[in-house]
Amino acid sequence: MRYRTIGTDARTRREVSVLSLGAMRMGTLTDEATSFAILDRYAEAGGTFIDTSNNYAFWVDGTQGGESEQLLGRWRRSRGVGDEIVVATKLGARPTSPSTGFSRDIEGLSAKVIRESAERSRENLGVEKLDLLYAHVQDRQVPLAETVEAFGELVTEGTVGLLGVSNHWAWQVERARALAASAGLPGYDVLQYHHSYLRQRTDLPSLRSPDGREGIMAGDLLSYLRAEPSLVPVAYSPLLGGAYSRADRPLGPEFDHPGTTARREALRKVAEETGATPGQVVLAWLLGGDVPVVPLVGASSVAQLDESLAAVDLELTPQQRELLDSTH
């Protein structure tokens, strides 16, 4: 395993593995015994960066979420896990009442919600301090300054270590960080967005925005990350739910453009040259790019996790990377 630093403040920064494990389905679609086996294997391989959210996975059984956090809490207690494992969680997208579908009726990012939700997550995970806490989705109904202040207060109080942001426009991230800096408060250090080798269209409206899909690591965000190298990008769904290797996992309409065919062909060539799977090439491409990304991978079995772990040691040649980068 390899490691990198997250956080810009020497008092709160952490070393984490370059491959993060997503626990979204653990406690619901992935049963406890299998989840524990996956978590054990990840820790055994040197993995130290686990990701969840306070709303995972409400849509499975019609709840408000919390099943994933609670399972991780049970795993931590049963294995005696301490500070060596960084567990990141998110708040803001938890439904306000039990639900089986995504809607606009979510808790949001008010100061009251942030404090109450952070406390609930600490209880679920069984920790005194949340290692990394994300603003999961944007909230246009709450002043950004209120959100920034509420998150910053949790860090200064010692109940949260690092802050992150997900599914916000790049201008919102920059404005929030500027507000935090001007107030002398901790700001967002980690940015979690969808990112993979195949590119999504960014013009399709999303549930929460008519302007397009705000959760994609598109050109404006990549440019921002190049200008702010201390920020750490985390890529969720980098393997597109298995679509790189499984015919029964078709791509959605957001990938319906000419670049998808060309990039798939480039990926096939590199996979053949390396003897690796397409998914492993995608992860290696993310890990070694000019903007190094932490891939956030899910797994429903130990075998799936082992395939992703092997990508950490896959080194692409300059020629292979040039082929992948230059194909559009």
Image (cartoon, rainbow, N blue to C red):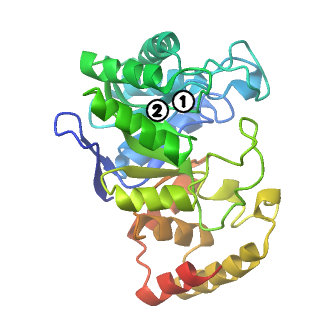
Q: Which residue is mark 1?
A: 53
- In percent of width and height, residue 124 lies at 48, 17
The amino acid type of the residue labelled 1 equals Ser
- In percent of width and height, residue 104 lies at 74, 25
The amino acid type of the residue labelled 2 equals Tyr
Q: Earlier in the sequence, mark 1 or mark 2?
A: 1
The residue at 55%/62% (across/down) is 219
Residue 74 seen by the camera: yes
The residue at 74%/27% (across/down) is 59
327 vs 168: above or below: below
* Number of residues whose C-alpha sits closer than 10 Å to that of mark 2, classed few (under 14), some (14–19) or many (20 or more): many
Q: Which residue is mark 2?
A: 134
181 vs 326: above or below: above
Residue 73 seen by the camera: no
Which image quadrant: the C terminus? Answer: bottom right
The residue at 34%/55% (across/down) is 228
Dot label at residue 217: none
Marks 1 and 2, Cα distance to the nearest angstrom? 9 Å
Which image quadrant: the N terminus? Answer: bottom left
Please, which residue is most extreme toward the front here? 182
Label 1: state its secondary structure. loop
Foreground: 77 or 6? Answer: 6
Q: In which quadrant of the rendered view does residue 206 lie?
A: top right
Label 2: state its secondary structure. strand
Q: In which quadrant of the rendered view does residue 224 lie?
A: bottom left
Foreground: 242 or 232? Answer: 232
264 vs 168: above or below: below
**Mark 1 vs 2: CB contact within 8 A:** yes
**Left or right, residue 132 beside residue 238:** left
The residue at 32%/18% (across/down) is 153
